[in-house]
Image (cartoon, coloured by chain):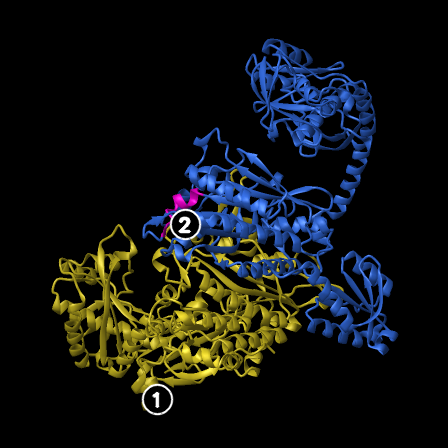
Chain colours: A yellow, B blue
Amino acid sequence: MIKITLPDGTIKEFTKGSTPMDVANSISAGLARNVISAKFNDTVVESVTALNEDGHLTLYTWNDTQGKKAFWHSTSHIVAQALEELYPGIKLTIGPAIDNGFYYDVDFGEHTLSEKDFPEIEKRALEIARGKHDFKLHPVSKADALFLYKEQGNEYKVELIENLEDGTITFCDHDTFTDLCRGGHIPNTGIVKAIKILNVAGAYWRGDENKPQLTRVYGISFPKQKELTEYLEMLEEAKKRDHRKLGRELELFTFSQKVGQGLPLWLPKGAALRERLENFLKKAQKKAGYEMVVTPHIGSKELYVTSGHYEKYGSDSFQPINTPKEGEEFLLKPMNCPHHCEIYNARPFSYRELPKRYAEFGTVYRYEQSGELHGLTRVRGFTQDDAHIFCTPEQLDQEFKNVIDLSLYVLGSLGFDNFTAQVSVRDLESPEKYIGSVDNWEKAENAIINAATEKGLDFVIEKGEAAFYGPKLDFMVKDALGRQWQLGTIQVDYNLPERFDLTYKGSDNELHRPVMIHRAPFGSMERFIALLLEHTGGNFPLWLIPEQAIVLPVSEKHEKYAEKVLSSLENNDIRAQIDARNETVGKKIREAEMNKIPFMLIVGENEEEANTISVRRHGGEDLGLISIKQFTDLVVTEINSTLKSFK
Amino acid sequence: MIKITLPDGTIKEFTKGSTPMDVANSISAGLARNVISAKFNDTVVESVTALNEDGHLTLYTWNDTQGKKAFWHSTSHIVAQALEELYPGIKLTIGPAIDNGFYYDVDFGEHTLSEKDFPEIEKRALEIARGKHDFKLHPVSKADALFLYKEQGNEYKVELIENLEDGTITFCDHDTFTDLCRGGHIPNTGIVKAIKILNVAGAYWRGDENKPQLTRVYGISFPKQKELTEYLEMLEEAKKRDHRKLGRELELFTFSQKVGQGLPLWLPKGAALRERLENFLKKAQKKAGYEMVVTPHIGSKELYVTSGHYEKYGSDSFQPINTPKEGEEFLLKPMNCPHHCEIYNARPFSYRELPKRYAEFGTVYRYEQSGELHGLTRVRGFTQDDAHIFCTPEQLDQEFKNVIDLSLYVLGSLGFDNFTAQVSVRDLESPEKYIGSVDNWEKAENAIINAATEKGLDFVIEKGEAAFYGPKLDFMVKDALGRQWQLGTIQVDYNLPERFDLTYKGSDNELHRPVMIHRAPFGSMERFIALLLEHTGGNFPLWLIPEQAIVLPVSEKHEKYAEKVLSSLENNDIRAQIDARNETVGKKIREAEMNKIPFMLIVGENEEEANTISVRRHGGEDLGLISIKQFTDLVVTEINSTLKSFK
């Protein structure tokens, strides 16, 4: 008999050789139907893997990230079989699951795969899936494995196997197909009900441009056809809302090859939008007792040796900046915390003066490979809405609650109602992994969990996910397309106060170590604006949108009245322009719609006579003839309904 | 006879061999009394140098920078004589004039010069001066010059002479003293009426730390004793107002060895002050039609190769930043213009859309040797209140006027009433030095001169002082201590539009080249705040000062009323705090005075009963018992008297 510990802590006994599926069956038939993969003592296993010792078991279904990975990785085997059948002689290399689906890198020889080939591949793959073939993982000797692939002339697999140790090599069979594979499969092909080949791209073998170029076939699969349909619709919508496309159309930002990849240039409308976001947060932060500071974008190497960043990230970062003489070395700052520690260190503090809350919209630079760059979400330079709170251990509880309040205020004001939180705590079984006293860790973890509970957050606790220097809370936001984004980490830190020798004088007149909290409700201005663009499709909340209204004179003779309307709007702090081009009102309305302007104010004969405006909302709703006062009241009311004052 | 052209263009004839002093005498006896140095065809000459050919002559008096330089350089000869007499066997090296006075670098051998030696040196130097000895410059052969200093065992002078060409070497004699010297002296020692040795410092021979260390003796001299007294008083006052000292005391900024030299860290009060200054300018700029943009703090090498900065400054700058792989090279941005050119280039423009005015508080990084760094006035990272205007040549005139308006608004709102301007134009005799068409240059120079005239500026035109890429206007501001600072350049640029191939479509449907104007009314936030600190001694204009008022409860029982007062002030946007420490009101007033807080609001029994406050102004004026409303009105009135709205 073996003892199996389940995630909720219950321990059950099974005969040696039982499988995860047996465990699932022992719990409920429903669970067993849904189990598609499992983890046994930190190793991914198949649902049919025999368990021969005591251990911790986690069962995965389609609803778990790990379950989806097994599902998609298994589909890559099915697609590989289809490809081999349709294009005999091709050489398969690797086929992993990714965040959304899977890919398989294939050497197609002379053949060039294109979109028109996709339906045939999907059709054959689905036929294979319907065969309900079991995935069977079995060990192979290195010699046998090499023999097989040498015979096939597949130098890629040969190279992979040569780097493996004899005794650790497994193959996975299903139907007529065999592949070198470490495991992590669903029980059988039959549960894959929908398969879509998404696109193909070039990819170098092992990511090395000196090696042969392969064809990367991207795909995705689902347990229900309906889910695939929804996913494809979402992809279509996401394409329309792609922040790179909207950013260009709305003239928010641009990139320049000469300035450099991954370094956004903010155009006037985008810069103004950013500033509104910053001012919004500054105002709330001021009320919450934060103080703004300003620090340089470089720091000497010594600063990062002190903080520990140099040792950890040095060689993967932008390389040091040397001075012409003097032999000094500086680094582009990858984060603001070391600078803020030096500000704290600029003078002594008494416990009576804490907490100190230093905030900065600090622009930081982090190297990313050019292939990894993506619009505003993966850049090489970005501005964090950063702040560091230095407090006594006793103040941590209250400070953490205050930060959650501020984060919830930010999410609410920007229309994100759909979010959860994750609390990352220590792995109690490996205390050696963590810096700081056990007492402080307990205090901090309790502070976070209490705060999250008291504030009514929907949160999960992830054991062992804390950083070595402290526990944290992450907000996970779902956007309008149902995609999950990590936003706003609140991180407790015992490490930097130690490394920078930060102190305060306690009521006992002795020096003590403060605790630090890192927090950034937006995360980065760049990524947040990208998210906001994709979440709203460019229809930003009224308080934030670049142009709130546009005045459309019906003809040239109403321009003067249009100017009068505009100046009334400006006096009421409404951002507006006049479209005085010699075009039809119909065309002007169409373009204003494209430009996502919330209100179109049409002014002609009738409006001028009655001293009114005809108001049309973005999307088409007609608000009729109203006075300018009525309109400005409407705007103010609408803004106040989303943008409340903090506290 | 020779023809001498004077600065005003008049040409006079003199016999060959006439001296600048003869020319002065021919103009007026008064001028001749004051002439102390001269420039003949771009070469500094003595007032007694014989002129043997036609040429341009400028006469200098004490009121000219060049006159002062001759005066101070001559004094260094006198002081050197005194030192040789007082410390026989010392070795003289070099003794130039500097911006304020002069120095002489001396090898004192075993002797260590200290402050207690200064009076004796001054006394002897003054005795020599009173001897009214003529300065006599005369040529010496290289062999004779080397012989003299070798005999004296002065290896420094020997080294200097060895690097000179035979036939170009001159000595200058006065009294019993002789020195190797290129010239630029006053007629005789007698006009030096006051000499002060200011301090001594170590200095390496030729600035090279591997060479012997010398003693640098700093001094200054004046034609009147009264001027020295005033200068020393000014130095005393400047010491009190030193922005480094005030910045520390008022907790505005700090430096950290770990972050790096010359990289200021802005503390909360300083960051808030900066932000108020930025918001003040942003508001005016918005009205003036500027649009804010945001650009990164690095740019690829290619950007600076395009702009020409790489070739010109590359090796003296912070060195390039390499990426871990990919072989890319980036540079810290030393200016914002190349980035703004790329923003302009992001889309095509029609003449109807110009001018475009892109503004950014852009932080730039420029390498300075650590020995050159000084507080906030000489730093390695600073934020420019930068903007670039892209306009048609026809718009240049109006745009230049607009920029002057904005600059005058900035100076006025910050209490600088004492300023002049300098217009730098081409040297018409060397047209090959300049880029851009003659026609455009004429237009631009006229535009600047017209604008300066129309706006009633007190300005001088400096021929040949324009940059190769365009003419400019500089504002020169005198601070409260009478010191001159250069502030706010407005620079026309024909070069970058060419290099970045900037265009707009004209009314003729053809592509044309826009003109660029660079401008920064503050110059840099860091330097401007330093200037403002030294100009005001920390007593910033009321609208700008960190704390406008402090509430001082007489005893603990009035704290609650003090809170009430504070909250009224905050509701009226007055920045204030309460000093609730258990100290006497007298001590609290003294500290508030030290902290330069404009208003002290004392609240005790009487005040609480009458719902009033006792107001004391910084400096001591008693405004008596007034209501909070009266006080807030007073503050608003005072602010409005300096801070007007732009336009």
* Element assignment for label 2: loop
Q: Examine the rendered structure and indicate whether residue A632 appears above or below residue B7.
A: below
Q: Examine the rendered structure and indicate whether residue B267 appears above or below residue B193.
A: below
Q: Which residue is mark 1?
A: A26
Q: Which mark is residue B323?
A: 2
Q: Nearer the viewer, residue B117 or B550?
A: B550
Q: Which mark is residue B35?
A: none
Q: Examine the rendered structure and indicate whether residue A456 appears above or below residue A554.
A: below
Q: Which residues are magenta?
A: B494-506
Where, by quadrant of the figure, is residue B272 drawn? Answer: bottom right
| Badge nearest the viewer, 1 or 2 | 2
> Label 1 amino acid?
Ser
Where does the C terminus of chain B fall, quadrant-wise? Answer: bottom right
Where, by quadrant of the figure, is residue B555 drawn? Answer: bottom right
Q: Nearer the viewer, residue B209 or A134?
A: B209
Percent position of residue A604, x then y: 41, 76
Is B501 covered by the magenta stretch? yes
Q: Residue at x 50, y 51 (%)?
A: B399
